[in-house]
Image (tube, helix red, strand yellow):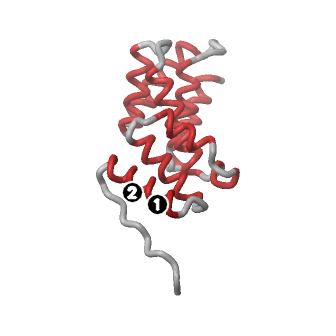
Amino acid sequence: MGGAAPVVLSDDPVERIAQLRAALVATPAKDSLKLDLALALLGHDELDEASRMLEALPAALYQEARAVRARARLALQRRAESVTADARHAEAMRLVLRGDTTAGLEQLVDMLRDEKHDEDSQARAALVEALQMIEDDTVVRDWRRRMAAVLF
């Protein structure tokens, strides 16, 4: 029953990143560590490096739910920080990113009502990204229905 014992990762984000980097150096072929490191970097707002790591994942891992949610989170974070995001949109996106999903999604749906005929709707794009981040399928279905009711 050989094999290495699982690494117990620190709760401190900086230390966690260092641990994952060291583990990846020790076992570079372990692709799951690459995703773990990308997620840790994303959680520590190291967006550029997280993006590079996510884009470099092998195809099977790239399609994994955690990677899809991470790319959506990254896109939403970048959208919230964008100079083109007005204050209302940015605040709604920040609410979602901070975990106040219901309040953020409600604001985005309200803004979508105003933008529903706009092909470049910031609210629509942010809603799609936010829904990709959510793990609970029931919640996602409910909010997709609300979004569809506004759009159609």
Residue 95 vertical position relative to residue 27 in the rendered view, above or below = above
Q: Amino acid at mark 1?
A: Ala
Tell me the quadrant of the picture where the C terminus can be found. Answer: top right
Q: Nearer the viewer, residue 21 or 132?
A: 21
Tell me the residue at 38%/40% (across/down).
44
Give the x, y percent position of residue 3: 51, 78
Q: Nearer the viewer, residue 138 or 98?
A: 98
In the image, 119 versus 110, the foreground residue is 119
Q: Residues within 10 Å of mark 1 (few under 14, many from 20)?
A: some
| Residue at 53% over, 17% down | 113
Identified at 58% across, 43% down, the residue is 54
**Label 2: few (<14), some or many (≥20) within 10 Å?**
some
Label number found at residue 58:
none
The three-letter code of the residue at mark 2 reads: Gln
Residue 138 point in image, percent of width and height: 53, 48
C-alpha gap between disc 2 and disc 1: 6 Å
Task: List the single residue furthest toward the right.
Answer: 59
Label 1 SS = helix
Q: Which residue is mark 2?
A: 19
Q: Position of residue 52 (x, y in %)?
A: 57, 38
Residue found farthest to the left = 12
Which quadrant would residue 42 be assigned to in this image?
top left
Query: In the rendered structure, are the residues bearing label 2 and label 1 in contact, judged by CB atoms less than 8 Å apart?
Result: yes
The residue tagged 1 is 23
**Residue at image point 42% right, 21% down:** 90
Residue 35 in picture, x, y percent from top left: 54, 52
When the figure is inspected, residue 11 is found, relative to residue 147, above or below; the finding is below
SS of the residue at dot 2? helix
